[in-house]
Amino acid sequence: MSLLDDFVAALEQGKEAISAAATSDALEKVRVEYLGRSGKLRDLMARIKEVAKEEKGAVGQKMNEVKDALTGLLENRTGELASSAPSGPLPDPTLPGITQRRGTRHPLTQTVDRIAAIFERLGFSIADGPEVEDEFHNFDALNIPENHPARDSFDTFFLSNDKILRSQTSTVQIRVMEKIAPPVRIIAPGRVYRPDTVDATHFYGFSQLEGLAVGEDITFADLKGTLGVFAREMFGKDTATRFRPHFFPFTEPSAEMDVSCIFCQGQGCKVCKRSGWIEILGCGMVDPNVFLAVNKKRGTDDYDPEKYSGFAFGLGIERIAMLTLGVDDIRRFFENDLRFLRQF
């Protein structure tokens, strides 16, 4: 092999070595190996005296071409390695990793799930309905007369096309009875809307859970027993209940249910206003007029008030959550403040 061929071979070998160098240190070793004082090109240059006089010009020219080519390839590879190198200090592999936070359910969702689980064990199923309603399901079928204050724009959000935002989940009770004949035993959690002034205990959009049981020979005793079990499961086995007469258009008789204060065990504190009791829900026996309205809509007499009776109740999810979680302002649930939500 001639010296000219050796220069060509050195160029090809140098190209491969430069391309394979993955670090600056490896590239520097390649530079020294080929262009250093004791490198391969220096050794080949020393053999030029062996070349015939008429060939020295061609060999010298090839020698310069190889040197320039390798020098250019080294510079390009140096730039490539520099651009791919990480900027700033290298990470310390001995440091602990960054923990990924796991998401949790919203505290209101947790409260709904807990309440629903209690009633499901009592034989209730979960029902749902639309949040945009009509006046029949929100008022007429629930025995709410046309001159009732609840129909005023100060108490209900009215939309176009004779639609409203439902002000109570009692609408789901009507829709369920329209679809199925008795017996019925359902709970209906969901969002409701009222134009309330926002403060620590009121919000224009909040959550309710309504319950309905319809069958033969259902009495107020069944209502008290069911809600008593719920109160003890929700607030503790020593929780006492009491029922105070009240008025709701869709139940008769009607009552408000109180539980013994979970903070002072009924001894009296600032939360229960020194009374020892906290109101948590409204309830009562289904008014026969509600059954008649459903029958008219169904075109049947399946809900015969002479044969069937039932009870209904409704509670505010936020109120229960505030009591069980120790939250003093309803607005906390809707601010999406992760510092607050991560506590639950």
Image: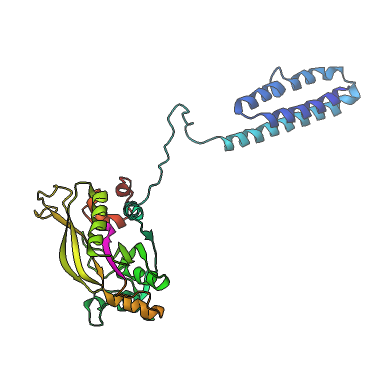
The segment highlighted magenta reads: 308-318
- Above or below residue 209? Residue 303 is below
Using the image as rendered, state which of residue 61 and residue 101 is in the foreground: 101
- Above or below residue 50? Residue 169 is below
- Above or below residue 55? Residue 249 is below
Give the colour scheme of this rendering: rainbow
- Magenta stretch: includes residue 102: no
- Above or below residue 230? Residue 171 is below
Quarter residue 330 falls in: bottom left
Q: How many marks?
A: 0
Using the image as rendered, state which of residue 158 and residue 321 is in the foreground: 321
Using the image as rendered, state which of residue 3 and residue 213 is in the foreground: 213
Residue at image location 20% in from the left, 70% down from the top: 253
Indicate the position of residue 277 as horizontal and vertical percent values.
Answer: 14, 55
Residue at image location 81% in from the left, 29% down from the top: 62
Indicate the position of residue 261 as horizontal and vertical percent values.
Answer: 16, 51
Q: Is residue 52 left or right of residue 75?
A: right
**Principal SS element in the magenta part?**
strand
Indicate the position of residue 84 as horizontal and vertical percent values.
Answer: 58, 37
- Magenta stretch: includes residue 317: yes
Quick one: quadrant of the N terminus? top right
Q: Is residue 163 at all visible to an observer of this figure?
A: no
Q: Is residue 331 left or right of residue 174?
A: left
Residue at image location 38% in from the left, 59% down from the top: 125
Indicate the position of residue 247 as horizontal and vertical percent values.
Answer: 18, 71
Q: Is residue 328 left or right of residue 73?
A: left
Q: Is residue 234 at all visible to an observer of this figure?
A: yes
Using the image as rendered, state which of residue 18 and residue 186 is in the foreground: 186
